[in-house]
Amino acid sequence: MHPDGDCEMITAMHRDTITADIAARLVAGQFPQWASLPVVPVKINGWDNTTFRLGDELSIRLPSADEYAAQVGKEHHWLPVLAPHLPLPIPEPVAMGCPTDEFPRPWSVYRWLAGEPASADQVTDLARFAASLTGFLAALQAIDASDGPPAGEHNFFRGGPLATYDEQTRQLIRQRADDIDASAATRVWDAAMASTWGRAPVWVHGDVTGSNLLVTDGALRAVIDFGGVAVGDPACDLVMEWTFFTGDSAAVFRRGLDLDEATWARGRGWALWKALLMIGEEKEGRSDADDAARRFGWRHSPRQIVDLVIADHARLA
């Protein structure tokens, strides 16, 4: 066990080569007290990490690329600090493993959190679900952030200035002009770029999406995957309004957070950027946009999300 997070990262390894056998050998070599526990892939895996269940009470998370490895030590340090202040369970780090010749990155063992990723089929009352989520986000934003890690490369600038993605987003709009209303999308982006977070930094989760929200009995029960956690602008945590909620539930989500319209405009910008990325990857033949949306737990397709943020901007303009 290496509680100081000083594990050295070495050579690259692709997510497709991370298997349950590798995870089991890592556990047996570094934490022999768990060597007899079965290692089983989870039903729906993440993107930043490959996750396995370890026995009945634990899980293993292995960063799926070098750029995600810095998140391991950050989670081990900050999740125990945040957890006591939050109304829902979040992952509890149990042990940190070091790189080996077979797996070249630090990795983690966590307590297992029960539940299924949020989806339209899993959530029985969207308005209640929205209220639970805003309660969690409001509590997260209220935690003292004075010593928290600023947004940066470690979390792909979630919570940082949206301008980080200005050039890329404008290029994506131009490239997708045959698929979307490019002029309207540009207006959405211009409005998002017109302001910055002017208050003190607050804690952000960085990747609030259906696949990171666990549901049991139709209700929100836990929030997972804090690799994007940082302090900064909470606009990045608002994208669920357009990716998951609709109608009354979207209104409940918006009312539940004490944020000005400029912050919601930046939230639309984050949602637009992500949806355009998914459409762009499909055009380049790297992925199916609708399949990617389902993996993230989005209830709407990327093209629908572009239309939703455009319509929302036009309604409020």
Image: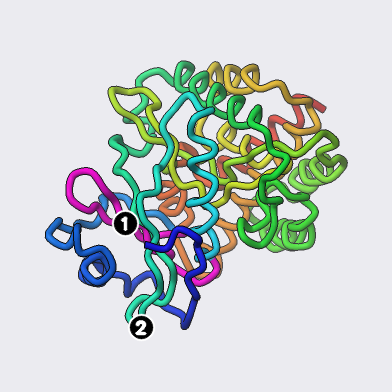
Question: Quick one: SS at disc 1?
Answer: strand
Which amino acid type is marked by label 2? Asp
Residue at position x 68%, y 55% from top? Answer: 157
**266 lies above or below 129:** below
Q: Nearer the viewer, residue 110 or 128?
A: 110
Residue at the spot 37% in from the left edge and 26% down from the top edge: 123
Q: Which residue is drawn at 40% across and 18% down?
A: 125
Q: Residues within 10 Å of mark 1 (few under 14, many from 20)?
A: many
Q: Is residue 122 left or right of residue 33?
A: right
Residue wearing tag 1: 60
Q: Type of residue at label 1?
A: Ile
**Element class at badge 2:** loop
Q: Residue under circle 2?
A: 101
Question: What is the magenta segment's predominant secondary structure?
Answer: strand
The magenta span reads 48-67
Asked if residue 141 is among those painted magenta in the image, a careful observer would answer no
Q: In which quarter of the image is the N terminus?
A: bottom left
